[in-house]
Each structure stands twice: as C-alpha cells, then as structure tokens.
Amino acid sequence: MANYAIVTDLNRCTGCLACTVACKAINGVPVGNFWIKTLRVGPHPKTEGAQFPDVEMYFLPVQCQHCENPECVKVCPTEASHVREDGTIQVDKSKCIGCQFCAMACPYGVRYLNEEERVVEKCTMCEQRISQGELPQCVSQCGARARFFGDLDQGVDNFEGPAHPDSPGCQYDEMTKTRVKLKDYVEPYSESDIHRLVDAGNGPKLMYLMREGRKWRE
C-alpha cells in the first residue's frame, strides 16, 4: 500500500499554468472547469507599512488535496467518492448521481458537476498514470520543476520529479523516464518550510514548500 501526495516548491513555481493546461489536456476537462487552479497570492508588503517595490507574491496551485479524512467521502450517499488503496480520493462515475453533496462538503471548492455527463469530477492525481508507475501529468510537465510526487510513507525527501532535459545524458524524450529526488534537486528546506492548506478537520495531504523570507498566507 502507498499514501500518494504531491509537493510544490513555491519558491520555484513561476505561475506559468503548465500544470493547469497539461491536466486539462490529458484528462479532457471541460472548458470553464479546472482540476488545478493556479492562484496568485499577493502582492503583499514584505514588512508592515512597506510599499512597492518592497512587496512579495507567489503562485499557489490548488487542486483536490486527497485528504486523510475526506469530507467528500463521508457525505457521498452512493459511495461513488471513495479512498483508493494508494491513498488517493477517486470518484466512481458509474455510482455518481450528480447530487453534488461532495462538492458542497469540500472545503477547497475543487469539485464541479460535469453538466454533460451529470457526474462530479475533480483531480484524480492521474491514477491512470501512477498505476503504471508514471508521474502525474502536472508533475511531469512542470516547466519550473517545482512539483514532485511520491509516497508519504517514504518521506517527503524521496518525492520524485522528472530530470531537467539539460541534465547530462538525458534527452528530452527520455526526460519523463529519468527521475530526480526532491532533496537532491531543490534548495535546502526544513520541516517548518512545509505548509498545507487550511485544515478543516479533513487532513489535507498535498504540501507546499515555502522557505524563510516569504510569508505563507492561508
């Protein structure tokens, strides 16, 4: 068994929307809907009373947090929303009746009703890819190499992302087959640099790295 999650290094994220676009393309997300929304947080003054240019901002990709204690699963009357053995939260469309109780229960507003199919959809963490040993599409296509995927039970340090195409001996077409570990690739970080979205008792699992010098704003 595994306990999959994604960590995003916000000191590296440039807000390019590659994760959002790649997700929509591979999963056929309808126009007007998103499985990942990349939000701009700020600009905010670096210190109280500071004015431009002494301001800071960052980009925050928000998607299903694949919670430890998901409210969406609790309220689903048909058990369409469920927890897989790998720790991800999935929606069985054959059981979904489109009641949207899960969408209302989600504290992050990351579910929506597919009007054509009349079923609820959201980020699946690309279960069709990770079940084959591949990375989620949003991770493999992150141009800034800010996103990493892995098993929480193996520790955040061991989360993996694709090697940069400029890495020695790595051609672009081989990139997604060559992995680098978070601890070996990004700038040093400590436990206090790891953040999560607001916990409403649901235990969000996805993580965000933000080091000293920037202020995490919930």
Image (cartoon, rainbow, N blue to C red):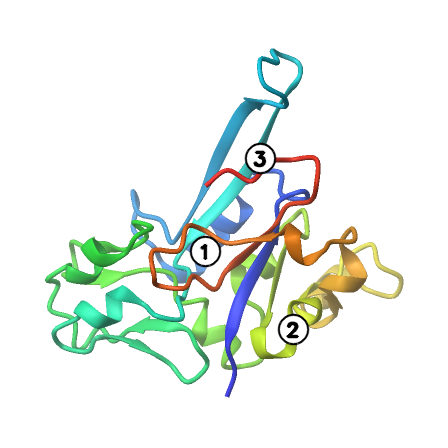
Who comes first in sequence, dot 2 or dot 1?
A: 1
Labelled disc at residue 23:
1
Above or below, 170 against 48 in this view is below
- Asked if the residues shown at circle 3 and circle 2 are in contact, with their CB atoms under 8 angstroms apart, the answer is no
Using the image as rendered, state which of residue 146 and residue 56 is in the foreground. Answer: 56
Identify the residue position indicated by label 3 in the image: 58
Identify the residue position indicated by label 2 in the image: 155
The type of residue carrying mark 2 is Gly
Q: SS of the residue at dot 3?
A: strand
Q: x, y (%) of residue 104? A: 19, 54
Above or below, 107 against 215 in this view is below
Who comes first in sequence, dot 3 or dot 1?
A: 1
Q: Residue at x 49, y 33 (%)?
A: 40
On screen, residue 5 versus residue 147, left or right, reads: left
Q: Quadrant of residue 201?
A: bottom left
Q: Quick check: can you spot residue 146?
A: no
Q: x, y (%) of residue 98? A: 13, 63
Q: SS of the residue at dot 2?
A: loop
Q: CA distance from mark 3 to mark 2?
A: 25 Å
Using the image as rendered, state which of residue 138 and residue 31 is in the foreground. Answer: 138
The type of residue carrying mark 3 is Tyr
The residue lying furthest to the bottom in this view is: 1
Q: Residue at x 30, y 47 (%)?
A: 33
Q: x, y (%) of residue 24? A: 41, 53
Q: CA distance from mark 3 to mark 1?
A: 21 Å
Q: Which of the two discs, 3 and 2, sits closer to the camera? A: 2
- Asked if the residues shown at circle 3 and circle 1 are in contact, with their CB atoms under 8 angstroms apart, the answer is no
On screen, residue 187 versus residue 86, left or right, reads: right
On screen, residue 30 versus residue 27, left or right, reads: left
The residue lying furthest to the front in this view is: 48
Label 3 neighbourhood size at 10 Å, few (<14), some (14-19), many (20+)?
many
